[in-house]
Image (cartoon, coloured by chain):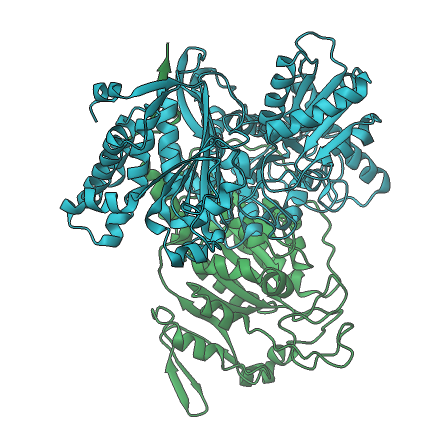
Chain colours: A cyan, B green
């Protein structure tokens, strides 16, 4: 892989590229995409990624349902989305080609492994003719190579079975693409050495395949040029690439470190939240305890039990898992104990679309419990923001002694972006402020402990953990009397307690930032308001409109309950407010109900994120109507 | 409610296995110290009163700091138990107490954690949590009050009610086959399984004491009379003459003889088969009802092992957050 040799071919400069790697679920496309991402991030491009895989682990090989893909957008400038349509499709078999072809625009580049374009595999993918030969791909730039055979040839020295040898074809393609886009290769090489430390044969075969792929790219006449995408200007600092689930797990560890509370995760495996459990189970060095429970209910139950004992109790789930946790969230509302409930939203209802993204749990988070049971709700806006939002969820939970619902989604969970490493010492500190002494004086002058005597500012009740002498008390799901906390069926007390629990959640607004509006010229009359993972596509669409000279304002909510205190004023100061959501209008419903502002929803539930061009089109239509 | 007490350094004394790691009380405690100021609101004549009394009488003998004792309950008549004890307590939700207690016990080795539950709470809505707590062997003492009826919901049959039982929800007789809670616990490989009676305070206390020597989940089934919806369910075991014939008092190392079968009762047998066979002596008619300890075997507890893994990981020092966040593939922009 002599770098100087590549100068032999012409190098063309591009400002951005969207590549999609696609193959069978077992072809290692996620790994290929992930390594290409690392190389690209390390090179200094801005990046945004979107993995897409079926819910089935290994659907029948060569069929459409088994196709797994990984899309990567990288650029020499600041980008916000994984790209609307791939410029380059790498397809490892006919099914991968067929499943992704409709997403391509004419002129796109297609690189295929021709090895599997046999009559049998073509039939499995639903082709009656070979698309590489029938002229159906003539609007694209097609590069067909027998990558499998070249891989097998490249690794034959290592004595692997043909099957094992051909499995290294993903590394061959990665090597080839790395050459094509001038990616640095060291991080992949050291990754392979680490990953297969104990399997030298596999390690060497993968390294050889990777290297052979690079060399093939350089020497083949199939590629006349290679491409250069300069690093994007970014603020100085140290960066890494991070996915939402990883950032969320790290944010929870950081919350534990910054609060001094041991982290206890109770969780039941469910896609796409499981990676948070996997990640946290590695961090026992930080005192993290992970409990893989017998079910979703036990997961949150154990977390609440740990919170009661003075730990930072966290539970993670997705899809129907959040429904199963409802009753325990209600108990946590009644007990007024800190609890972080992470819901990595996916397509619903029921099992729905386990590996696809959606934002349809907002109203469940808001209202999905019996009784008046308000909770705080926060949502991250990008993969890296999952770190900050985890800290924010922990801060609110601990300060206000309340369950906090953290709504991530499948797109954020698996998508990734460059992340500026925070200075650990300047992360917010969280004060558990455990109760350590009686807080009430009885008529006879004795001091006693009242578990529901509240902090006048936050309305939070004291957190007196077992082991604290003199503060022995009983809590539970039955209504408690204000102050002393004994069981109470008194009508006026219940009314007071219901209103107080609501008021406590409302008070959180005093501690959160005002919503900021990005309105460069300050004279837009259209506001686009989003929450969660739509930040990227909305931001991207707004940039495009501004480049066309249009005025549009953007604001994004990270706090969904309570809302930032200036939100009503912001909404009312625009002539039109459009709210794009991957649901049928859940935030829009809350905004209309609370502020009586006639916001207009733009809704889609296709299991995939909005594209910037789609939103650009929608917003253009609104602007035309406004200015007609 | 309580008044403050001065914390005093704990004394290092060899505690029974189940209580190791829990600080000792600097002062002698009495029943009164464990009695909360709440009015007990069970029905007159309820077996729960006797059990409460026995537990309040038993706790001072442990010598533990009161603030390190926690009772967690679910929902049902029995689950009001924590309100009446002046320890830490949580009255939680239906069936979930073992899960909540698992999180508490795992994160706090210095607590003596009890679960109070009933036949509906533990065996119906919470059956899954119960078997998994026993399977994991979390260091908990579970008191299962079995009155063979739903009391708090006013008299429906429970998972331990006999077939044919006439209740509000089964006017033509229940067709549900009941659980034998001891057999169930043995099937889940619980490491400590016992049965006792609400009215036999000496026996109940003896079983509780044995449970405290056990590290792991101790499941204690307590036959408890509901005077309102299932009165007299266990009368045949309480009548002096009848009890003599029906109760099979289990003692480790002693013979158990029923008909032509004889076993030497070995509570420490690794294989639970014999204990299970003994648990089947009661065919539902209460002709032969074994009480006492069915099984007590040593097995690593879930919570000890979780903490050991954490301790081992921390042996070389605590985690470095900055290093964790940076990972292996970070880069600088200058």
Q: Who's the residue at 71% across and 24% down the image?
A: A619
Could you say where residue B78 lies in the image, as x and y percent from the top left?
Answer: 65, 59
Left or right? Give the position of B86 relative to A567.
left
Residue A56 visible in the snapshot: yes
Residue A157: image quadrant is top left
Residue B216: image quadrant is bottom left
**How many numbered discs?**
0
Left or right? Give the position of B298 relative to A595.
left
Q: Is residue B324 above or below residue B135?
A: above
Q: Who's the residue at 61% across and 64% down the image?
A: B145
Q: Who's the residue at 49% across and 26% down the image?
A: A384
Left or right? Give the position of B304 relative to A394.
left
Left or right? Give the position of A481 relative to B275.
right
Front-lying residue, B325 or A285? B325
Quadrant housing the C terminus of chain A: top right
Residue A246 visible in the snapshot: no
């Amino acid at each position: 892989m002599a770098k100087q040799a590549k100068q032999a071919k012409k190098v063309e400069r591009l400002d951005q590229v969207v590549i999609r790697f696609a193959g069978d679920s077992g072809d290692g496309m996620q790994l290929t995409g992930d390594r290409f991402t690392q190389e690209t991030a390390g090179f200094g491009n801005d990046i945004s990624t979107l993995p897409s895989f079926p819910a089935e682990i290994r659907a029948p090989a060569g069929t459409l349902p088994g196709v797994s893909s990984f899309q990567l957008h990288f650029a020499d400038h600041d980008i916000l989305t994984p790209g609307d349509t791939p410029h380059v499709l790498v397809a490892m078999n006919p099914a991968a080609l067929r499943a992704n072809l409709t997403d391509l625009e004419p002129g796109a580049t297609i690189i295929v492994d021709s090895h599997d374009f046999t009559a049998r595999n073509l039939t499995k993918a639903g082709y009656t003719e070979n698309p590489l030969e029938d002229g159906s791909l003539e609007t694209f730039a097609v590069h067909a190579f027998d990558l499998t055979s070249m891989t097998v040839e490249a690794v034959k020295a290592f004595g692997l079975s043909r099957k094992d040898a051909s499995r290294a074809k993903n590394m061959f393609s990665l090597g080839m693409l790395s050459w094509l886009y001038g990616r640095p290769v060291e991080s992949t090489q050291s990754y392979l050495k680490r990953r297969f430390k104990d399997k030298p044969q596999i390690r060497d075969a993968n390294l050889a395949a990777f290297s052979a792929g690079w060399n093939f790219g350089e020497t083949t006449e199939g590629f006349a040029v290679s491409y250069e995408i300069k690093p994007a200007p970014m603020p100085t600092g140290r960066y890494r690439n991070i996915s939402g689930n990883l950032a969320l797990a790290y944010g929870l560890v950081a919350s534990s470190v910054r609060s001094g509370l041991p982290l206890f995760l109770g969780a039941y495996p469910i896609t796409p939240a499981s990676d948070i459990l996997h990640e946290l189970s590695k961090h026992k060095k930080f005192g993290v305890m992970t409990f893989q429970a017998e079910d979703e209910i036990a997961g949150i139950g154990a977390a609440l039990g740990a919170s009661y004992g003075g730990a930072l109790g966290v539970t993670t789930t997705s899809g129907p898992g959040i429904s199963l946790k409802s009753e325990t969230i209600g108990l946590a509302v009644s007990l007024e104990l800190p609890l972080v409930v992470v819901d990595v939203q996916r397509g619903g209802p029921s099992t729905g679309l386990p590996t696809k993204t959606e934002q349809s749990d907002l109203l469940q988070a808001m209202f999905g419990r019996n009784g008046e049971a308000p909770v705080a709700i926060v949502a991250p806006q990008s993969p890296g923001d999952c770190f900050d939002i985890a800290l924010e969820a922990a801060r609110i939970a601990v300060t206000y002694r309340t369950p906090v619902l953290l709504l991530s989604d499948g797109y954020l969970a698996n998508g990734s972006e460059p992340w500026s490493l925070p200075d650990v010492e300047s992360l917010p500190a969280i004060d558990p402020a455990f109760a350590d002494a009686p807080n009430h004086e009885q008529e006879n002058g004795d001091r006693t402990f009242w578990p529901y005597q509240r902090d006048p500012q936050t309305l939070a009740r004291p957190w007196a953990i077992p082991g604290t002498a003199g503060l022995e008390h009983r809590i539970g799901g039955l209504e408690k009397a204000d102050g002393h906390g004994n069981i109470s069926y008194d009508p006026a007390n219940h009314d007071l307690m219901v209103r107080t629990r609501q008021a406590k959640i409302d008070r959180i607004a005093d501690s959160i930032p005002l919503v900021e509006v990005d309105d460069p010229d300050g004279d837009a009359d259209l506001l686009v308001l989003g929450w969660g993972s739509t930040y990227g596509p909305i931001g991207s669409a707004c940039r495009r409109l501004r480049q066309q000279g249009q005025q549009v304002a953007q604001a994004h909510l990270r706090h969904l309950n309570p809302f930032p205190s200036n939100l009503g004023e912001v909404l009312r100061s625009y002539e039109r407010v459009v709210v794009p959501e991957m649901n049928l209008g859940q935030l829009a419903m809350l905004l209309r109900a609370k502020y009586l502002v006639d916001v207009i929803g733009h809704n889609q539930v296709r299991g995939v994120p909005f594209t910037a061009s789609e939103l650009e089109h929608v917003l253009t239509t609104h602007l035309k109507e406004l200015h007609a | 409610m309580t008044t403050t007490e001065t914390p005093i350094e704990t004394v290092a004394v060899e505690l029974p296995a189940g209580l190791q790691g829990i600080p000792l009380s600097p002062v002698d405690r009495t029943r009164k110290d464990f009695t909360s100021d709440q009015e007990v609101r069970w029905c007159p004549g309820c077996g729960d009163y006797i059990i409460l009394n026995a537990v309040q009488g038993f706790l001072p003998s442990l010598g533990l700091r009161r603030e390190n004792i926690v009772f967690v309950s679910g929902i049902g008549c029995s689950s009001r138990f924590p309100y009446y004890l002046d320890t830490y307590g949580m009255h939680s939700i239906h069936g979930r107490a073992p899960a909540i207690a698992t999180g508490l016990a795992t994160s706090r080795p210095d607590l003596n954690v009890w679960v109070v539950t009933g036949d509906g709470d533990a065996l119906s809505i919470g059956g899954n949590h119960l078997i998994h707590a026993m399977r994991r062997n979390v260091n908990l003492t579970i008191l299962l009050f079995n009155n063979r009826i739903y009391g708090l919901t006013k008299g429906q049959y429970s998972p331990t009610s006999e077939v044919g039982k006439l209740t509000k929800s089964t006017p033509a007789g229940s067709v549900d086959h009941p659980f034998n809670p001891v057999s169930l616990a043995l099937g889940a490989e619980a490491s400590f399984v016992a049965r006792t009676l609400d009215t036999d305070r000496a026996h109940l206390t003896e079983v509780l004491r044995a449970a405290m020597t056990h590290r792991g989940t101790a499941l204690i089934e307590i036959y408890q009379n509901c005077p309102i919806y299932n009165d007299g369910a266990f009368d045949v075991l309480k009548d002096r003459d009848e009890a003599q014939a029906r109760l099979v008092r289990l003692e480790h190392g002693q013979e158990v003889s029923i008909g032509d079968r004889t076993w030497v009762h070995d509570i420490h047998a690794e294989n639970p088969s014999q204990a299970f066979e003994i648990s089947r002596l009661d065919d539902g008619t209460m002709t032969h009802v074994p009480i006492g300890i069915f099984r007590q075997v040593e097995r690593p507890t879930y919570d000890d092992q979780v903490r050991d893994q954490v301790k081992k990981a921390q042996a070389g020092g605590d985690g470095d957050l900055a290093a964790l966040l940076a990972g292996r593939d970070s880069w600088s922009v200058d």
